[in-house]
Amino acid sequence: MRRLLVALCLLAAILSSARAFAQTRSSLGPLCTTDTTPADQMVDACTKIIALKVFKGEQLATVYFWRAVGWNKKGDYAKVVTDATEAIRLQPSQAAYNLRGSAYYDRGEHEIAITDFDDALKLGPPSGIIFHNRGNAWRGKGDYAKAIADYDMSIKADPSSAFSFQNRGIAKEALGDLDGALTDINQAIRLDPSLPQPLINRTAIWRVRGDYDRAIADGSEAIRLAKEKPPVNIMTPPNSVLISGYTHRALAYEAKGDYAHARDDYKATLAIAASDAGSKANQATAKVRLSLVTDANVPIPRDAPSPVTQPAPAPQQTGAAPSPAPVARGTRMALIIGNGAYAHVKALPNPPNDARAVARSLRDIGFTVSEGVDLDRAAMQKMTRDFLREAARAQVVVVYYAGHGVQVDGRNYLIPIDVELKPGASMTDAMIDMDTIMAGLDDQVRTNILIFDACRNNPMAQQVASTGSNRAIEGASGLAAPTSLGAGATLGAGTLIAFATAPGQVALDGEGANSPFSAALSRHLGTPGLEVQQMLTRVRAEVVSSTKSKQVPWSNSSLLGEVYLTEK
């Protein structure tokens, strides 16, 4: 359960007022003020009572509160906020602040939600439910220490709260405390063995530890429970837990090398998600993973050995992608591509040099690197798909691309060297969709760092050849900023995506052997003890200085904690 909605212990004052007007308006009152009333009937009954204009003050606040509950059931958070705000204006209450804060949380407005939960707690008495909900908001902001502190208070108030133990475990997992996470999630399962979600969380932990059989067993039990007992939380879509169960079990099967069962589970995910309007991200991830395991002819040996660092690669032929080395569990992996020898748009001299420099820096700090230079579409697609398949067993992934990139209809594409950029419906079929890469990497147990030193302009213009010493294809706006990160099927992958320059701007190719961005990146990648976002801050400062502010690198993050590419 993501959050706890309205608890009876918070509603004593409101309920007493509700009974007063329920007796006065017997036909409408019970429909408006009974939590089990269907959402549409509740909203309709409360609306009719408000229209009577016979209630004021506390009683009218009660009606607005219950109508907000009805809107909450319907998922109309804007109207929840409006009605809860009116209820608070008329008569402030813990329940109204909690409800409005929960609506802000569901809208992703975590800071405002925290303020409402603060106000609710000020009204007293201390409430484990409000501490729990505020903990969720802190977790949504990525402040896991404060989230854990609030879950501690929630558990102190109610030691039988399986959801608080579950969510505290999730926060501990995000901080890398797998032992603490496992202890909390085990307790949640002991407190309520009928809940599938803690089992799904434990599935992910077993997979991190390489215990795929336990992961599969927990995933199977979670699926059974989700089928047997659909979620009762009115804000949880009925199929969301089942979808999550199938997805996590599929990932465990895939990591084990059992592609046949992984395919079955991804197909089950797609069949269920197809009827759920809110499952587009789930569908995208399942489609990509299903395609990858369908193409896999030979399973990855479960205990295949792999060196921590891949030896320096043999000289590569233009347009050819080397086969990735076998990947062991826990490996830090990188996909590095540099395209410059374009056939139909202006060639770029530096991307191959940039790719080699970044690949060398990552190998030096222990990454297994798959590297490709000047790849046509077939080679680029094969290398990307091979990498995504084997990344199922990796803990940290870095993807770096240098070359041309474009935005078409709000989606970003990376351009192979053989693509002829002409306006037309089929143009994107010849490119590599960045969203596909992100969907293929969506997984809450892995950290994903995606870095793109690509052009920032859209080629949807008659003149597509670039001019000057830059990576810009003359046209309209640059690459699209990602609208969300880690919001896919696994409910929160830790992902950072970085671009060499800000949206709408041009990434310079540079006057030397490397672009300004890649030169700075390769220098700072190996800095010991430097957290990845601090590393990118140093890269940004160096690029701004070296380009005299003509280029400002940009990034967006949903990382679940501090990430170090090198040892502290």
Image: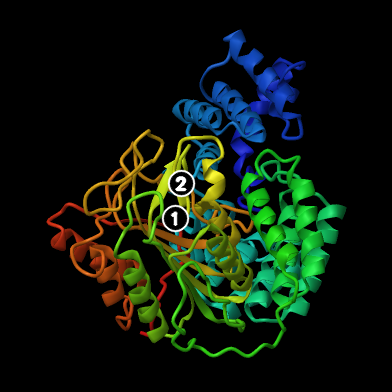
| Residue 446 position in % (x across, y down) | 55, 69
**Front residue of 344 and 274:** 344
Residue ranking furthest to the front: 343
Quick one: label 1 or label 2, which is nearer the N terminus? Answer: 1
Q: Residue beneath label 1, please?
A: 141
The answer, for residue 111, to whether it is visible in the render is: no
Q: Which mark is residue 485?
A: none
Q: Secondary structure at mark 2?
A: loop
The C terminus - image quarter: bottom left
Q: How many marks?
A: 2
Residue in view at x 37 percent, y 70 percent: 355
Q: Residue beneath label 2, please?
A: 420
Vertically, is 178 above or below 490? below
The answer, for residue 89, to whether it is visible in the render is: yes
**Front residue of 117 and 314:** 314
| Residue 345 position in % (x across, y down) | 36, 49
Residue ranking furthest to the left: 548
Vertically, is 110 above or below 99? below
Residues at marks 1 and 2, CA–CA distance in whole angstroms: 43 Å
